[in-house]
Image: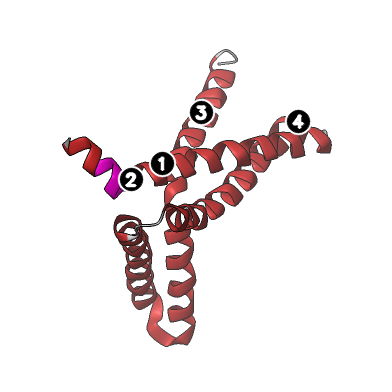
Amino acid sequence: MIIFGPLFVIAGIGFFCWLLFTFAVFALPFYAGLTVGAWAFHTGAGWLGGAVIGVIAAGVTFGVGQLALAFVPWTWLRLAIVLVYAAPATIAGYYATHGIAQMAMPSATWQMIFSFVGAVAVGVTALIRIAGTAPPGREQARLARA
């Protein structure tokens, strides 16, 4: 069993890192849905009503972002939209990496260094994935047809 313990730890950390990178794109819709769902619950909608309202708010947030990326013609505005969606992913990446670093090393300095590296890695990954979901601009579509 002593041989399998470290292997399971490495596999678990790898799984959670993969999960973090995969779901980082949905950090803003998740946060919006959680906030609106909690608000609905505290205003008397109950747990089922809060959950339904939260899921609807998350879907609307994701849909609005996708529509905005699809129909905004200016590159600078698309970049701003992508940055708005990638910023919560960067913050989530920082805190997830910091939690793993706290378990792995006692030095606060190294914890912060790894946390910042993790935040940058998750933020850049989310930025690339969000930008990759956007349809090509008018210039690229015109060049593709030619």
Q: Amino acid at mark 3?
A: Gly
Residue pointed to by mark 2:
133
Q: Earlier in the sequence, mark 4 or mark 1?
A: 4
Marks 2 and 4 sit apart, C-alpha to C-alpha, by 37 Å
Magenta span of residues: 134-141
Structural distance between the alpha carbons of marks 1 and 2: 6 Å
Query: Mark 1 belongs to which amino acid?
Result: Arg
Is there any visible trace of residue 136 in the rendered image? no
Pointer 4 with pointer 1, Cβ within 8 A:
no
Instruction: Give me the residue at 54% from left, 18% from top.
Output: 7
Q: Position of residue 141 (x, y in %)?
A: 23, 43
Q: Residue at x 34, y 66 (%)?
A: 55
Q: Is residue 74 above or below residue 131?
A: below
Which of pointers 1 and 3 lies earlier in the amino acid sequence?
3
Q: Amino acid at mark 2?
A: Thr
Closer to the camera in the image, 132 or 97: 132
Quadrant of the rendered image containing residue 131: top left
Q: Is residue 130 left or right of residue 109?
A: left
Which residue is tagged 3? 14
Residue 44's quadrant in the figure? bottom left
- Tag 1 residue: 129
**Mark 4 against mark 1, which lies toward the viewer?**
1
User: Mark 1 near mark 2, Cβ–Cβ under 8 Å?
Assistant: yes
Q: x%, y% of residue 106? A: 80, 33
Give the left or right position of residue 44, taking residue 2 as reference: left
Q: Which residue is mark 4?
A: 105
Looking at the image, residue 40 lies above or below residue 62: below
The residue at the point 82 percent across, 36 percent down is 109
- Residue at the left extreme, as displayed: 145
Marks 1/3: CA–CA distance: 19 Å
Labels 1 and 3 touching (C-beta < 8 A): no
Q: Is 8 a magenta residue?
A: no
